[in-house]
Image (cartoon, rainbow, N blue to C red):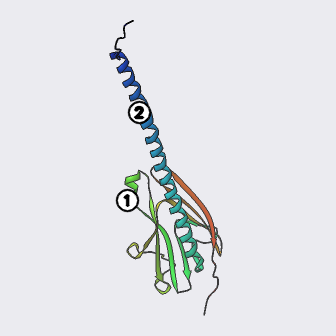
Amino acid sequence: MSRGRRAFTMVEVVVVVGLAALFSTVVFRMFSSASSSQKSAMVDLGMQSRVLTTQNRILRMIREGTDFLLPAVGESSAALFFADFEGNVQVLYQLKDDDLSKSTGKMLYKLMHYKVDVKKFDISNPVYDPEESTVIADYVKDISFLMTSANTVNITAGFATEKRDFQVMFEVGLQNSGEVE
């Protein structure tokens, strides 16, 4: 019996290299898929946080109010006008965000806040100045304020990212009603 040296044939080497390439491709796709799922989950969590923060800001602002001015009871509007104890009229309204709309491919707005001295406010011609306004939220798809009673407003808001839409609906009442002397 002679002992010969045995080597791998070229076919065996090609098969092993092919299997290794196939295995590494499958593993790479699994990790890249998990990575994209994580990114998507992070975007969703970020938007949920943004929606909750916006809801809390709106709640705090409205609870400091004393009287709703517009819309009237039973009416719905994209803007809300209310008076506060400091003698101001506060306005929440949406303003189109051209840059965000272009980048996401959806019509998106910013939720804006405007405060004006009640003496300078004309109820027959309610206006707001975008230059004097501050941003409350972005990624707003739509917002609606439905006056359900003299002291309560129902707010429905939609938010959107490139891939997903989020909806929130809540009701808030004036915590302070009546006038302070």
- Residue to which mark 2 is pinned: 24
- Crowdedness near tag 2: few (<14), some (14–19) or many (≥20) residues, C-alpha within 10 Å: few
Residue 92 image position (x, y, % from top left): 50, 71
Residue at 52%, 69% (x, y): give it: 79
Spot the residue most to the front: 1
Picture quadrant where residue 151 is located: bottom right
Left or right: 10, with 147 as reference point: left
Q: Which amino acid does label 2 sit on?
A: Ser
Q: Nearer the viewer, mark 2 or mark 1?
A: 2
Q: Where is residue 49 in the image (x, y as percent from the top left)?
A: 52, 61
Numbered badge on residue 119 = none
| Mark 2 or 1, nearer chain start | 2
Q: Nearer the viewer, residue 20 or 149?
A: 20
Where is the C terminus found, in terms of image quarters? bottom right
Q: Name the residue under label 1.
A: 98
Residue that extends furthest to the bottom in the rendered view of this protein = 181
Q: Nearer the viewer, residue 164 or 102?
A: 164
Helix or strand or loop: what does disc 1 sit on?
helix
Image position of 17 (left or right of 54): left
Q: Where is residue 17 in the image (x, y as percent from the top left)?
A: 36, 25
Identify the residue at image location x=45%, y=41%.
31
Spatial CA distance of label 2 from label 1 is 44 Å
